[in-house]
């Protein structure tokens, strides 16, 4: 029973907050309060939502969609619209239950139908449900649905509130502000500014961007109305102004990442909504049906359909993973772009093991010119930067000769050229320029080419499927090659003489003065000593979190001891996350053979899980002495609460808060095959500032053994007791 009550409570909060495309519980509370300024309407809306939640649970609808209000916010609007239109009676309650069921059925159907085309359904179920009820109301028996007399539902409190609202209206408030507040109250089928104040305040607390957008949509609509329909039309604007408010928040804060272009799109949408509003009124006017939010709904659906069908994806960017907050959507997008702006669909890896030197880079000084300027040549050098041992007159004197050449990614062999003899040192074969060569297809219009291979060493044939890291051949000196080396390039076609394309290497490590730097989706520079990252088994196993896995930590923070438990789950999008039931906190993560990194956190920032999120924000799963990792945190982790509201407002234009993460491995018992490592990481409010928090993660016995947090002159220690 307790779990069912929590479920219903969460679903009710989700239903109210989803009216503004949010999952903020404070907003839900404010909207619930605003709806009860008119008790009849408030009760009708709440009864409708509870009915829909119970029906959803009985018939087995997706509980996640019910809990976040996705299936029930239209039911709420339907119930409130009926409460605002008809007198409260037992007969009314019966019809209300039917309307709630109808709205729920239409919501689920439209969600399924629109989802196939990646389109929103917005408030279509609400509009259709209310229209069906209104059209039938004229043929019902007279006692079933009686038109509402607003005075009947008022009590002493609501009468006092309405009187107070009227006083505000006549004393001190500018006419534009009054019109804005009335437009906000019209969202809940009311026309008093007190309701508008409560709704606007809830919106401001939950999202500064959404609040700003509500004013942008309202002002743009007001200006266009004044221009197109004259001053007299402004008297009616409060009844339709919420369409422009909803459109601004939906387009520039929910479906699209907030940006200058998404804000400009709102200004484009406003006159289109106005035209829809007038045309639809002419069409349905004879049937005495209200438009409600239909103009905004139809225009947003049309705009999103157009944006979904763009051939080239440009700003404004569509939100791919919805976080139900304009700020969170924007900050998550910026973090993703900062991390993966160069990432490619196919990850290309270095075609060798060990340390090699880039002897000729892009636009090299010898042969990498014009159509072949994006190629790379690799050799092996010693501490004196020589590629051979003395006397250096034979092929076997060169360090890279006969070393393994590996497949840079999964693919299919499309071209094989073999049988070309290796040159003597200093000689070249201009007639068979590329020498022994392999071309591998990795995807549509993406091929890699490996040339100057050792004669007779190629181990694959045309049509063979190869895996990343699979042995293909040996390094040689065939073709136009005065000494042994690997020529490596990416190209769009399978031909040996095809021109090169500029395509980055996924991950590689650069060695500089006995220290190491990890590069992601970049191009090695000429003269750099590079190596292919080799996963350290200890790190790979310690950060290998699989669904169903549980972790338990005994925590000591100096004042109390407790146990915090985490479990690994996957969401509907197959994204993995750690979940702490006690604190209701989630930390989403991704991992591959090279890097483990967190992608987002929701929940209690006082939890151990949040501290682990900060401590292990980005972990390289390869151990190299002195290897330092840096990344940018999303703005949400900043502890500068005073500046946060200002940052939220101007975030679509400029982000000045840039929290920074850095980490390095502090100790190791064995550089080659460590059995114990300590990851030391730091959190900085800004680049080059002093660390706000320091963390140590002890990794031992293939698991996270201990987490130490030093923050605000306090030390917290968590030991793995699983």
Image: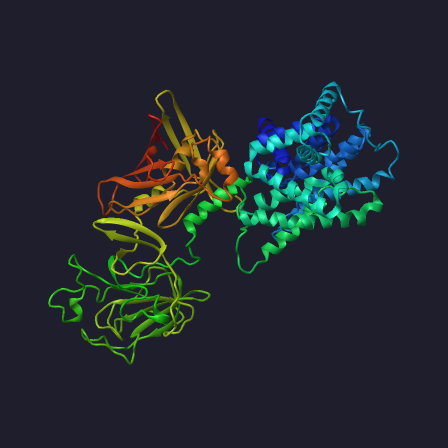
Q: Nearer the viewer, residue 468 or 693?
A: 693
Q: Is residue 343 above or below residue 656?
A: below
Q: Nearer the viewer, residue 229 or 673?
A: 229
Q: Nearer the viewer, residue 561 or 387?
A: 387
Q: Residue at x 61, y 47 (%)?
A: 266
Q: Residue at x 42, y 29 (%)?
A: 564
Outermost residue on the left side: it is 391
Q: Is residue 695 above or below residue 435?
A: above
Q: Is residue 654 above or below residue 385?
A: above
Name the image quarter holding residue 52.
top right
* Quadrant (top left/top right/bottom left/bottom right) for the N terminus: top right
- Residue 292 image position (x, y, % from top left): 73, 41
Q: Is residue 327 left or right of residue 719?
A: right
Name the image quarter holding residue 48.
top right
- Residue 104 image position (x, y, % from top left): 69, 40
Name the image quarter holding residue 714.
top left
Q: Is residue 213 left or right of residue 666?
A: right
């Amino acid at each position: 029973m307790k779990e069912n009550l929590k479920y219903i409570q969460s679903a009710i909060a989700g239903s109210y907050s989803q009216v503004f495309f949010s999952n903020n519980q404070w907003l839900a509370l404010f909207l619930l309060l605003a709806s009860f300024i008119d008790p009849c309407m408030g009760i009708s809306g709440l009864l409708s939502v509870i009915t829909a939640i119970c029906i959803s649970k009985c018939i087995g609808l997706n509980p996640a969609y019910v809990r976040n209000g996705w299936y029930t916010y239209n039911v709420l609007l339907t119930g409130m619209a009926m409460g605002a239109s008809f007198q409260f009676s037992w007969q009314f309650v019966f019809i209300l239950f039917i309307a709630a069921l109808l709205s729920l059925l239409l919501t689920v159907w439209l969600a399924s139908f629109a989802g196939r085309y990646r389109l929103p359904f917005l408030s279509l179920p609400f509009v259709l449900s209310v229209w069906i009820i209104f059209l039938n109301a004229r043929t019902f028996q007279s006692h079933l649905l009686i038109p509402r007399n607003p005075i009947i539902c008022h009590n002493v409190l609501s009468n006092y509130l309405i009187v107070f609202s009227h006083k505000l209206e006549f004393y001190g408030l500018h006419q534009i502000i009054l019109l804005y507040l009335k437009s906000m109250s019209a969202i809940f089928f009311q026309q008093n500014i007190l309701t508008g104040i409560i709704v606007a305040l809830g919106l401001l607390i939950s999202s500064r961007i959404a609040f700003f957008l509500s004013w942008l949509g309202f002002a743009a609509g007001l200006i266009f109305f004044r221009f197109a329909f004259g001053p007299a039309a402004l008297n009616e604007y409060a009844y339709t102004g919420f369409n422009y408010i909803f459109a601004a928040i939906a387009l520039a804060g929910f479906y699209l990442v907030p940006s200058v272009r998404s804000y400009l799109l709102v200004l484009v949408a406003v006159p289109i909504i106005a035209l829809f509003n007038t045309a639809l009124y002419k069409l349905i006017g004879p049937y005495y049906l209200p438009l409600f939010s239909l103009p905004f709904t139809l225009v947003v659906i049309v705009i999103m359909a157009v944006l979904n069908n763009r051939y080239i994806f440009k700003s404004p960017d569509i939100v791919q993973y919805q976080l139900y907050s304009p700020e969170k959507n924007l900050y998550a997008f910026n973090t993703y772009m900062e991390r993966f702006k160069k990432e490619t669909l196919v990850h290309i890896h270095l075609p060798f093991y060990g340390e090699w030197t880039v002897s000729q880079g892009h636009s090299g000084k010898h042969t990498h010119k014009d159509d072949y300027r994006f190629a790379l040549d690799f050799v092996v050098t010693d501490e004196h930067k020589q590629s051979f041992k003395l006397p250096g007159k034979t092929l076997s004197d060169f360090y890279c000769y006969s070393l393994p050449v590996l497949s840079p990614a999964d693919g299919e062999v499309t071209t094989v050229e073999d049988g070309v003899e290796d040159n003597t040192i200093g000689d070249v074969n201009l007639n068979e320029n590329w020498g022994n060569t392999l071309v591998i297809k990795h995807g549509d219009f993406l091929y890699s080419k490996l040339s100057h291979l050792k004669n007779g060493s190629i181990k694959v044939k045309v049509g063979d499927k190869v895996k990343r890291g699979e042995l293909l051949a040996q390094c040689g000196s065939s073709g136009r090659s005065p000494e042994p080396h690997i020529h490596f390039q990416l190209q769009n076609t399978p031909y040996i003489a095809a021109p090169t394309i500029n395509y980055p290497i996924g991950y590689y490590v650069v060695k500089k003065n006995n220290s190491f730097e990890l590069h992601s989706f970049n191009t090695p520079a000429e003269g750099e000593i590079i190596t292919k990252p080799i996963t350290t088994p200890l790190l790979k196993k310690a950060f290998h979190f699989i669904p169903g896995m549980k972790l338990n930590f005994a925590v000591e923070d100096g004042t109390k001891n407790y146990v915090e438990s985490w479990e690994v789950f996957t969401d509907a999008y197959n994204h993995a996350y750690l979940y702490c039931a006690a604190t209701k906190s989630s930390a989403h993560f991704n991992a591959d053979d090279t890097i483990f990194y967190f992608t987002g956190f929701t929940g209690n920032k006082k939890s151990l899980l949040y501290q682990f999120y900060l401590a292990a924000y980005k972990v390289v799963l390869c151990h190299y002495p002195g290897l330092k990792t840096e990344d940018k945190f999303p703005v949400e982790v900043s502890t500068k609460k005073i500046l946060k509201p200002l940052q939220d407002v101007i975030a679509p234009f400029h982000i000045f808060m840039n929290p920074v993460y850095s980490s390095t491995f502090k100790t190791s018992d064995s550089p080659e095959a460590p059995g114990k490592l300590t990851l030391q990481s730091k959190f900085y409010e800004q680049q080059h500032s002093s660390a706000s928090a320091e963390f140590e993660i002890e990794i031992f016995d293939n698991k996270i053994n201990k987490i130490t947090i030093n923050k605000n002159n306090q030390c917290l220690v968590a030991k793995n007791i699983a």
